[in-house]
Image: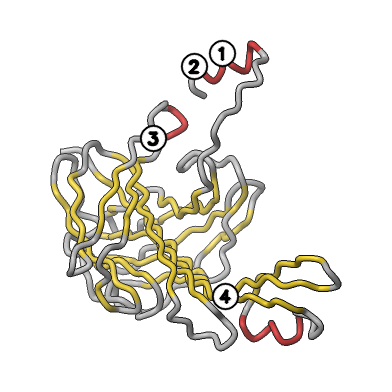
Amino acid sequence: MHRFLLTILAAGCLIPITASAHKTWLLPSQTVFSGNDPWLTVDAAVSNDLFYFNHFPLGLEGLQITAPDGNSVEPENAAQLKYRSVFDVPLTQRGTYRIARVSNGVFAGYELNGERKRWRGKPESMATEIPKEATNLRVTESVSRIETFVSNGPLTTENLQPTGNGIELVPITHPNDLFEGEQATFRLVVNAEPSKGLEVTILRGGTRYRNAQDEIHVTTDANGEFQITWPKPGMYWIETSIQDSHTSVDQANSRRLGYTATLEVLPQ
């Protein structure tokens, strides 16, 4: 905990402290492996401080692990703990694995008997779970992707192509070939099409142990691309989101798309 915050708490001062927004993430134990039988462990959580377990676990529904050959892999030893979820992945193939938690759903607001209500779920459940007497119904479609990338041996890209669902990161620089002081280029796509003007936040982990967040902000160009020169080694969190009216759910008035990724930058 920061020294100045300890001082404030010890003094009993009622100084409001601005809380940072909650962040969702998948944190791999490492991103580059070698050997005949390596295992990966992944933590999944929602937290205030980046990569520190202090809020609640990230659910593992919608978890998609794609092996280098494109086939799906089931997680092993999956568990949901008090503040984090965990799972293991045996890296039996050589190449790059794509690990993502993908969520497709809707959330709605409505009024019932003079009271405002909220609901979240799958589109197909709306008809049975939202009362027919509801008025002023407002529905927003939501598509989010939280992911990371891990390689065993050679860096491959065959399974890193966009699926066409929501915001996705297309690596120009391989996501497991990142080093301090070097520039990396990535493309962000929306439904597989390059997206101009996406505002991207890049943040190095360990925010609990420094007073300044040191966020980096970039914007995608006409090709949907952005560049980042990594200032220090460490685990980095990349986030972007967008809201538009291109819905695929009939009742939805708007659509929210979100994307986060965890990337590891190694020292020179």
Circles 3 and 2, Cβ within 8 Å, touching? The answer is: no
Colour scheme in use: secondary structure
Left or right: 20, with 207 as reference point: right
Where is mark 2, residue-wise?
3
Which residue is the extreme one toward the right? 113
Name the residue type under label 3.
Gln
Circles 1 and 3, Cβ within 8 Å, touching? The answer is: no
The residue located at (58%, 16%) in the rendering is 8
Circles 2 and 4, Cβ within 8 Å, touching? The answer is: no
Name the residue type under label 4.
Gly
How far apart in space, not on screen, are marks 1 and 4 (Cα)?
A: 44 Å
Where is mark 3, residue-wise?
213
Figure check: 65 above or below 4? below
Q: Which of marks 1 and 3 is nearer the N terminus?
A: 1
Where is mark 4, residue-wise?
105
Q: In which quarter of the image is the C terminus?
A: top left
The residue located at (35%, 53%) in the rendering is 238
The residue located at (17%, 60%) in the rendering is 173
Where is mark 1, residue-wise?
7
Q: For the residue carrying disc 4, how many other residues have a C-alpha within 10 Å: few (<14), some (14-19), or many (20+)?
A: some
The percent coordinates of residue 250 (x first, y second) are: 56, 88
How far apart in space, not on screen, are marks 3 and 2 (Cα)?
A: 15 Å
Q: Which of marks 3 and 2 is nearer the N terminus?
A: 2
Q: Earlier in the sequence, mark 1 or mark 4?
A: 1
